[in-house]
Amino acid sequence: METVYDFELPKGYMDGGGELHRRGKMRLATAGDEISATRDPRVLSNPSYLTIVILSKVITELEGVEAITATLVEKLFTADLAFLQDMYQRINDIEPPTLTAVCPDCGKSFEVPLNFTGEG
């Protein structure tokens, strides 16, 4: 069973030095991740902050960035945050992440594995 997934952000995280970081890894969430996030003081005062805290726990790596924190996740472009929220939902679902595709020639629908890296 795969527990860590590679991704590539659509826009990328721009650090203080102007460097762009796009490739990273996200692991499956645990019950402990979700429980501790709901107890976070920032979430208690603002429930919409839950997404930020959970993502900061499950994103294990962002190429060239030393530590993933809630403050870093706050600084992501909205397109990247939406991408990571969608990825989180897909990988933590019971089924492996797939996408329904339609053949342009015959019109037949089929499921294909979802690749978050933008490769292949």
Image (tube, rainbow, N blue to C red):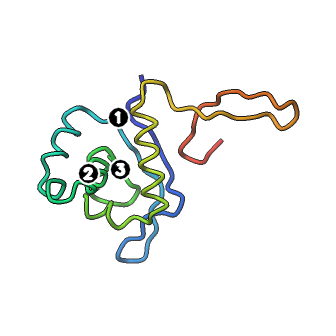
Residue 108 locus on image (x, y percent): 79, 27
Q: What is the C-alpha distance between the residues marked 3 and 2?
A: 20 Å
Q: Residue at x 14, y 51 (%)?
A: 40
The quadrant in which residue 100 appears is top right
User: Between residues 38 and 18, which one lies in front from this camera angle?
Assistant: 38
User: Between residues 82 and 11, which one lies in front from this camera angle?
Assistant: 82
| Residue marked by disc 3 | 61
Q: Residue at x 32, y 46 (%)?
A: 60
Location of the C terminus by quadrant is top right
* Lower sequence index among marks 2 and 1: 1
Q: Nearer the viewer, mark 3 or mark 2?
A: 2
Residue 86 locus on image (x, y percent): 46, 45
Q: Residue at x 15, y 59 (%)?
A: 45
| Residue marked by disc 2 | 50
Which amino acid, by three-letter code, is at mark 3? Glu
Residue 112 locus on image (x, y percent): 64, 30
Left or right position of 64 against 71 = right
Q: What is the C-alpha distance between the residues marked 3 and 1?
A: 13 Å
Where disc 2 sits, the SS reads helix
Which amino acid, by three-letter code, is at mark 2? Leu
Residue 26 locus on image (x, y percent): 38, 43
Is the C-beta separation of discs 3 and 1 under 8 Å?
Answer: no
| Residue marked by disc 1 | 28
* Lower sequence index among marks 3 and 2: 2
